[in-house]
């Protein structure tokens, strides 16, 4: 052992290598920085940069996975709702025929929805797709209130074509085919094209409320003129032109002689110089019998 130590001591004295190497280690190898970390561009990088980069990489990877899986909106809604922007109250105005359920269904609000991410424009378009809604407006009041203002369609008349009856607007637009007792007082217009001219006959009848109250339906004939079906079964045939004058004549005859309360089936007002009244079958038979008993021949048949 002494011989080996003596040899190392002799070698160190001759060359000085070992003494240099041992003296050069002023810092332990664990605490030494690599040469590229103390010179050039890398010397400007702060010590916390590698850790921040690692966390950033993990965050980007998570965001990419969420986006790729289609969960970005759900996560965003959850985050914004949890910090105080959840929809907590919905105020609805103008609802008469549209139900709250229909509005909520069109808004498409999920559990704990976020007011910040709620798309008011898309919701407005869905609301206006409901038949009874003419237009809608949506306002957001932060942090958590949604205000929905509805303007509904005004039912103007009923339009019947075949077995289908619809509620229509004044412009003839179909609102719905679900007709119930709420619309019993609306005028029923019949046949194709009648929906576009409902306002025409309505404006004439509004000048004669006594007659209007008796009208059950208005039938458009050959897209030129109207026949009125009264509640007692009488049909009033109106001319193509001067409808107001014809209705005025009808009112005069009814006021003077109770024409519309008699046993008749039709009143024809299409001729300007006369009014043609058609009796019912029973009335015609009674009239014929009366004339025969008087001994006066009848040449008028059932029309007079």
Image: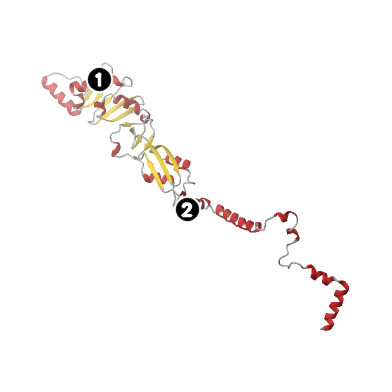
Tell how many labels.
Answer: 2
- Residue 301's label in the rendered image is none
Dot 2 or dot 1, earlier in sequence: 2
Q: Quadrant of residue 4?
A: bottom right
At which x and y percent is residue 178?
A: 34, 40
Q: Quadrant of residue 257?
A: top left
Q: Nearer the viewer, residue 162 or 62?
A: 62
Eyeballing the image, is 117 above or below 54?
above
Q: Is residue 304 visible?
A: no
Query: Mark 1 falls on what kind of element?
Result: helix
Eyeballing the image, is 37 above or below 135?
below
Query: Mark 2 falls on what kind of element?
Result: helix
Q: Quadrant of the C terminus?
A: top left
Q: Residue at x 87, y 72 (%)?
A: 15
Eyeballing the image, is 231 above or below 123?
above
The residue lying furthest to the top in this view is 273
The CA distance from mark 2 to mark 1 is 74 Å
- Residues packed near mark 1 inside 10 Å, few (<14), some (14 to 19) or many (20 plus): some
At which x and y percent is residue 22?
A: 79, 71
Q: Nearer the viewer, mark 2 or mark 1?
A: 2
Q: Quadrant of the N terminus?
A: bottom right
- Residues packed near mark 2 inside 10 Å, few (<14), some (14 to 19) or many (20 plus): few
At which x and y percent is residue 79?
A: 50, 52
Q: Nearer the viewer, residue 85 or 152?
A: 85
Q: Is residue 250 visible?
A: yes
Q: Which residue is mark 2?
A: 82
- Residue 249's label in the rendered image is 1
């Amino acid at each position: 052992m002494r011989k080996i130590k003596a040899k190392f001591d002799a070698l160190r004295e001759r060359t000085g290598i070992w003494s240099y190497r041992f003296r050069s280690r002023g810092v332990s190898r664990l605490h030494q920085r690599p040469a590229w970390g103390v010179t050039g561009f890398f010397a400007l990088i702060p010590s916390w940069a590698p850790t921040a980069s690692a966390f950033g990489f993990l965050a980007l990877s998570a965001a990419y996975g969420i986006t790729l899986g289609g969960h970005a909106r759900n996560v965003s809604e959850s985050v914004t709702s949890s910090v105080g922007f959840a929809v907590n109250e919905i105020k609805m105005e103008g609802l008469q025929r549209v139900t709250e359920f229909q509005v909520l269904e069109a808004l498409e609000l999920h559990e704990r929805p976020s007011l910040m991410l709620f798309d008011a424009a898309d919701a407005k378009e869905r609301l206006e797709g409901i038949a009874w809604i003419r237009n809608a407006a949506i306002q957001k009041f932060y942090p958590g209130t949604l205000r929905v203002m509805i303007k509904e369609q005004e039912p103007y008349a009923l339009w019947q074509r075949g077995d289908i009856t619809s509620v229509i607007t004044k412009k003839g637009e179909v609102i719905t085919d679900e007709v119930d007792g709420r619309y019993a007082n609306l005028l029923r217009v019949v046949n194709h094209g009648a929906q576009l001219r409902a306002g025409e006959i309505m404006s004439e009848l509004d000048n004669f409320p006594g007659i209007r109250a008796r009208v059950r339906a208005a039938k458009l004939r050959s897209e030129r003129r109207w026949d009125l079906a009264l509640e007692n079964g009488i049909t009033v045939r109106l001319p193509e032109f001067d409808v107001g004058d014809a209705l005025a004549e009808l009112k005069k005859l009814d006021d003077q002689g109770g024409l519309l309360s008699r046993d008749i089936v039709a009143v024809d007002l299409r001729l300007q110089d006369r009014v043609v009244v058609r009796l019912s079958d029973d009335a015609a038979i009674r009239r014929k019998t009366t004339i025969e008993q008087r001994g006066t021949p009848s040449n008028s048949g059932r029309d007079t």
